[in-house]
Amino acid sequence: MAITIDPQAIGPVDVACIGFVGDTFHGEIVPALKELVDSEVVRIIDLAFVAKAADGETTALEISDSDIAAAFVGFDDDQHDLLSEEDLQLIADGLEPATAALVIVWENRWAARFAGAIRNANGFLISQDRIPHQTVVQAIEALESN
């Protein structure tokens, strides 16, 4: 059952596609994600798994469509099904054989108040970038070597 989200009160929303070698996911992903949800740092809006077998066959499972959903107790209440079957098939088609991906759409609840304040002040986002982890590591290492 989907809940109603006030579009004026929602925080920034991100989507990520996280790749994995093989078609299995390690057990530490669910507890780490659940911790973020339980602490209200994020709200999961949509969550799916896609895979491409070694023979090229692709599969896509939305969390509510699979028996994996039992591991994500409480997440399906916030689902809004933003990822279409076509979106998931495009992602699966783009995977290398014998790989899988977690596709996740989440609201950054920690930033909702700030984002609302910007909207109330007639502000708007001009640009936003995420700095890749390896770039941050290299910058820190360069600073430490000076």
Image: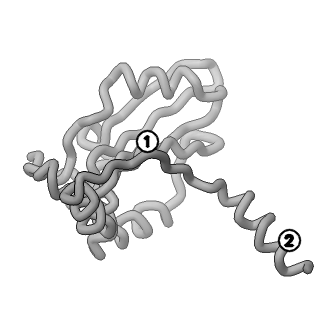
Front residue of this view, candidates 71 and 135: 135
Q: Nearer the viewer, mark 2 or mark 1?
A: 2
- Which residue is label 2 attached to? 142
Which percent across, then down, holds residue 62?
31, 37
- Asked if residue 37 can be seen in this view, the reply is no
Which image quadrant is residue 118 in?
bottom left
Question: Looking at the picture, does residue 140 appear above or below residue 8?
Answer: below
Task: Specify which label sits upstream in the sequence, 2 or 1.
Answer: 1
Quadrant into which the C terminus falls: bottom right
Residues at marks 2 and 1 touching, judged by CB atoms closer than 8 Å: no
In the image, residue 43 lies at what x, y percent?
27, 59
Report, in whole angstroms, how far the alpha carbon at label 2 lies from the one at label 1: 33 Å
Q: Residues within 10 Å of mark 1 (few under 14, many from 20)?
A: many
User: Residue sitting at 39 percent across and 64 percent down?
Assistant: 33
Q: Mark 1 belongs to which amino acid?
A: Val
Instruction: Report crowding for label 2: few under 14, some 14 to 19, many 20 or more residues within 10 A (C-alpha).
Output: few
- Secondary element at image label 2: helix
In this view of the protein, which residue sits in the foreground, 96 or 45?
45
Left or right of 114? Residue 19 is right
Could you say where residue 86 lies in the image, as x and y percent from the top left? 36, 19
**On screen, 125 above or below 28?**
above
Query: Which is nearer the eye, 109 or 105?
Result: 109
Q: Residue at x 64, y 32 (%)?
A: 98
Does residue 17 appear anywhere in the picture? Answer: yes
Image point (91%, 78%), residue name: 145
Query: Which secondary structure lies at badge 1?
Result: strand
**Callout 2 amino acid:** Ala
Residue 80 % position (x, y): 20, 41
The mark tally for this picture is 2
Q: Residue furthest front?
A: 122
Q: Residue extending furthest right?
A: 146
Provide the residue designation for mark 1: 103
